[in-house]
Image (cartoon, grey):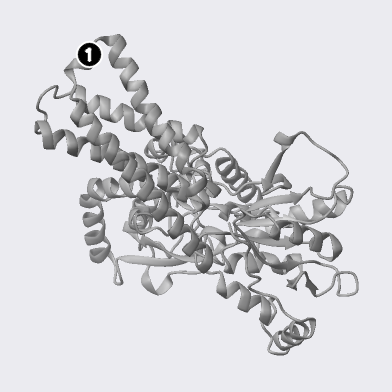
Amino acid sequence: MTEKDPAHRFTAEAVKAASDDGKKEGVASLSKVAQEVAAQYRRDTMSPVMVSGGVRLIEFGLLLASGFLIYIYYLGFLGHLGWQYPVVILTASLATVIFLEIADCYQLQSLLKPGSALGRALLCWVGTFAMMAVAAFFMKVSEDFSRLIFGAWFAAGIVLLVGLRLLVARVIRRWARNGRMERRAVIVGGGQAAEVLIRSIEQQPFNDIRICGIFDDRDNRRSPPIVAGYPKLGTVSELLEFARIARIDMLIVSLPLTAETRVLQLLKKLWVLPVDIRLSAHSNQLQFRPRAYSFIGAVPMLDIFDKPINDWDSVAKRAFDILFSLLGIVAFSPVMLATAIAIKLDSKGPVLFKQKRHGFNNEVIEVYKFRSMYADQSDPTARKSVTKNDPRVTRVGRFIRKTSIDELPQFFNSLFGSLSLVGPRPHAVAAQSHNLLYNEVVDGYFARHKVKPGVTGWAQINGWRGEMDTDEKIRKRTELDLYYIENWSLWFDIKILFLTPIRLLNTENAY
């Protein structure tokens, strides 16, 4: 990708003045400059992995559709060789995409500069037809198929491959200019090492990195406020807040491996964020095997943490949520209607109860439940946990809480996207244990929010549901939630989803 324009290059005086203004105005923890920078990066971007994957699907779809249309035009729908032609067209389209993948035609630089890859792409298309011709010869079926149909498809495929790649290159360039497709990175650690790193990244001809700023705990005497034209936006603790406002993709720690203690201290703070964390290795004396590194252009990085459920995994999980949420709403609609009527007849107040809880990346979301408490005694903040025989709970409320029917409206949360069907259960923003917030009880508690919270989760089907009256219960739930995040797969989600009704029969801790 083309070299990035330094979107946030400031003078040292301007940064200091803005920082002082922020302190005078009593702005939370971020300086005025940091807030302005974060505000510019609120919008999500298109991942290069998603773009190249999308091109694969579109290319496959275009080749497949063109082949079918040409076949239908000449022979009619399911005409001569009604199943053989579709199978051959499908196989050839799939084989072409595989050949293009092998030839590196879906790499970012190949898509960005199609002139260098068009020859390889067309060679792959020619190779597919050569493979079909050889297969037909040895199977002695070449006379059964129309040369006119395959000749027309061959010509159409050339036009589609060339046209699509020229269009994709133009779109990617426009996305690169307006910031729609980039990986946003923050440098952790300043000084000379950070400057060398930034210069090295900016010199790479095909990188998609947008450096958003620098965070460093050292004062301006040891770490200048401006490094390579980028401002120092705050301390590492303030970076946690910054990364929850801005849509940051990557943190690059610019510290030598020899500073082991400091690196570990930083990682202990940063690992709770849903971002890729890389340790710059461009100036380290220790040399590892090439497979130990990931690269930004030619700049080596050591992978410390990867963002969980990212790129196509997130697409698959979202499709899973939409499909099973719709099925759940349809299947449980009679139960939800009956519950709504029972709540109305049992006590005054609304049928639904809305509660603010922590969602993905520690954002505050609003979760729906059936109201199970008397309206004038409801506790939206959940400062006081519901206990056994709690007088605030209605008669209907006791039953729907025991059976988890009160959670059924969260199918709509999952359908609309604030929750996932499976994930760490979201806790109320002010939920406490012994007058301590949960994040004060468990070190790294907010790492649960590296993925979208769920209607059900691994902790719940392992018996950790209901009242959290001890610190040990909070720690155990967090441990199981982190296990789920580290071991996520669609099969894991399906297992949890189908085990949930069975495990809910145990109502020991549900009041």
Q: Amino acid at mark 1?
A: Val
Q: How many circles with numbers are drawn on the protein?
A: 1
Q: Residue at x 59, y 41 (%)?
A: 486
Residue 403 appears in the rendering: no
> Residue 477: x percent and y percent?
58, 46
Question: For mark 1, what is the residue?
Answer: 141
What is the quadrant of the N terminus in the image?
bottom right
Helix, strand or loop at label 1? It is: loop
Residue 494 percent location from the top left of the image: 41, 36
- Residue 292 visible somewhere in the drawing: yes
Left or right of residue 12, residue 250 in this image:
left
Does 44 sit left or right of 23 as displayed? left
Q: Quadrant of residue 412?
A: bottom left
Whole-percent x, y for residue 126 in the image:
38, 30
Seen at 35% across and 45% down, the residue is: 58
Decide which of 58, 72 is in the foreground and name it: 72
Q: Quadrant of residue 479?
A: top right
* Residue at the image point whose x is 41% and y is 37% from the top: 122
| Image position of 2 with respect to 55: above or below | below
Residue at (86% x, 41% y) in the render: 286
